Image: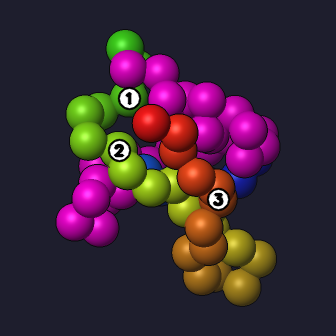
Amino acid sequence: MTRYRFLDGMGDVVAEADHASHADALAWARDEEETPEGVNRVEYLGPEGDWRWAGALEG
């Protein structure tokens, strides 16, 4: 499992969760019923302890 964080348009973290893959994290971010409002960007914790971009959210 990889740690993901979900950020709003201002770059503030609105949620953190563990997911098996980028696709799972992005799908969770797109699910309006589960995800906090305002998620704009998804990042994951890389092997060196740095946050990295996980992919784009579609409109």
Pointers 3 and 1 in contact (CB under 8 A)?
A: no
In primary-sequence order, the first of circles 3 and 1 is: 1
Q: Which residues are magenta?
A: 7-32
Q: Is residue 8 left or right of residue 28?
A: left
Q: Amino acid at mark 2?
A: Val
Colouring chosen for the image of the structure: rainbow
In primary-sequence order, the first of circles 3 and 2 is: 2
Between the C-alphas of marks 3 and 2, the distance is: 13 Å
Pointers 3 and 2 in contact (CB under 8 A)?
A: no
In the picture as drawn, the residue positioned furthest to the top comes out as: 33
Q: Which residue is mark 2?
A: 39
The question of residue 31 being in magenta is answered with: yes
Across and down, in percent, residue 24 comes to 69, 34
| For residue 24, above or below residue 12 | above
Between the C-alphas of marks 3 and 1, the distance is: 16 Å
Residue sitting at x 37%, y 50%: 40
